């Protein structure tokens, strides 16, 4: 996509299988600084090319988390702890020590847990519309929790599709989040999400995996433990619109105010006129993020 980087993939063994990892290497630099980028709950490593453009001279390491993309066959439980430990295997495979970590949506929660479980591997955090607790009722049932947070996203995972044309052109082309931000890069990202399922196709992320991860990041113990001792330099980016381009977004103003009081060590940045998807998966979103991106 960009002349500043070359793109390759590799497979990294983890418990239960192997992770597909996308790597964007800066052109002409063999020993570049690196950043690790972690995608959201139903996404893949192909969510990041617009952000890569904002990181010339930096190697960008982008795994498909277990249960997503080309890592969808990895067996065993998910959850923030499992994802964090998988990412250490990725860093080991690339011989990377400590580096900045950028997480979007669920990936931001994974990043916080990674910094807690393996602090020697994380130098700083950029949390994009995720990572700090969401405003959910206590004691809510798992299925209700997923519907409350993900809404139509959860329903999409249970559907079957005839192929790329129906999935990309039929479902996603009319999605309100991308009405003004449809691009060839987005089409490639969406097409990559489909995997065969008998005579039809389904999204690579299973509904069960989404439930497990969503419940863990909202009710599990790893995230609260990590946030209680958060000490890495951390920037928290929010946007005003959510998954359906609705307002408010994931962090409504009053809830956001409470969070910033609870975590005064976190620097907050609010970006205008973007939604939960386009903050990462559009050129204008990545450009708005550009000044805040760590560069190794």
Image (cartoon, rainbow, N blue to C red):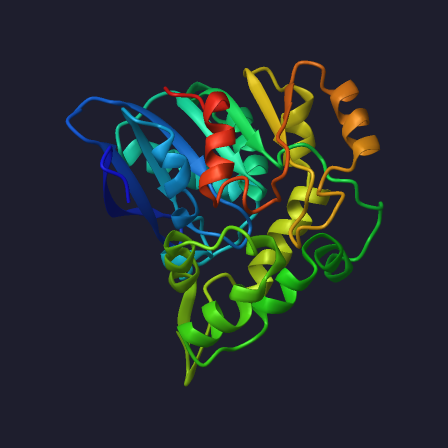
Instruction: Say whether residue 18 is left or right of residue 168.
Output: left
Q: Picture coordinates of residue 126 (x, y %)?
A: 53, 26
Q: Residue at x 51, y 37 (%)?
A: 285
Q: Look at the image and tell me in which quarter the C terminus lies.
A: top left
* 179 with respect to 3 (left or right): right
At 24% from the left and 43% from the top, the residue drawn is 7
In the current view of this chain or complex, which residue is farthest to the bottom? Answer: 199
Measured from the top left, where is residue 102 in percent x and y? Answer: 48, 31
Write down the quadrant of residue 70 in the picture: bottom left
Residue 145 image position (x, y, % from top left):
75, 55
- 189 horizontally vs 210: left or right: left
Evaluate whether residue 42 shows in this view: yes
Viewer-proximal residue among 273 and 60: 273
Up the image or down, 10 lies above or below 75; here it is above
Q: Quadrant of the N terminus?
A: top left
Q: Is residue 129 above or below residue 155?
A: above
Residue visible at 60% across and 50% down in the picture:
213
Q: Position of residue 100 (x, y in %)?
A: 43, 23
Which residue is painted at 42% across and 74% down in the image? 165
Q: Nearer the viewer, residue 250 or 215?
A: 250
């Amino acid at each position: 996509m960009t002349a500043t980087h070359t793109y390759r993939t590799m497979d990294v063994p983890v418990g239960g299988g192997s992770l597909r990892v996308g790597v964007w290497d800066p052109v002409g630099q063999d020993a570049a600084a690196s950043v690790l980028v972690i995608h959201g709950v139903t996404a893949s490593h192909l969510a990041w090319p617009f952000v890569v453009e904002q990181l010339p001279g930096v190697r960008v390491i982008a795994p498909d988390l277990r249960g997503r993309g080309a890592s969808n066959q990895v067996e065993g439980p998910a959850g923030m702890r499992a994802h964090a430990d998988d990412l250490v295997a990725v860093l080991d495979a690339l011989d990377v020590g400590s580096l900045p970590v950028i997480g979007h949506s669920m990936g931001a929660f994974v990043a916080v847990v990674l910094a807690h479980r393996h602090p020697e591997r994380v130098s700083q955090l950029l949390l994009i519309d995720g990572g700090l607790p969401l405003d959910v009722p206590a004691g809510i049932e798992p299925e209700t929790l997923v519907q409350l947070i993900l809404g139509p996203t959860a329903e999409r995972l249970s559907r079957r599709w005839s192929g790329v044309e129906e999935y990309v052109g039929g479902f996603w082309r009319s999605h309100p989040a991308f009405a003004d931000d449809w691009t060839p890069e987005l089409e490639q990202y969406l097409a990559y999400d489909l995997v065969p399922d008998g005579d039809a196709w389904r999204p690579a992320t299973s509904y069960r995996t989404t439930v497990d991860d969503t419940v863990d990041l909202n009710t599990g113990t790893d995230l609260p433990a990590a946030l209680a001792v958060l000490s890495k330099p951390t920037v928290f980016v929010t946007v005003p619109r959510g998954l359906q381009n609705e307002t408010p977004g994931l962090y409504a103003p009053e809830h956001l105010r409470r969070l910033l009081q609870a975590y005064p060590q976190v620097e907050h940045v609010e970006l205008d006129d973007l939604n939960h998807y386009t903050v990462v998966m559009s050129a204008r979103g990545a450009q708005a993020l550009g000044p805040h991106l760590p560069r190794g």
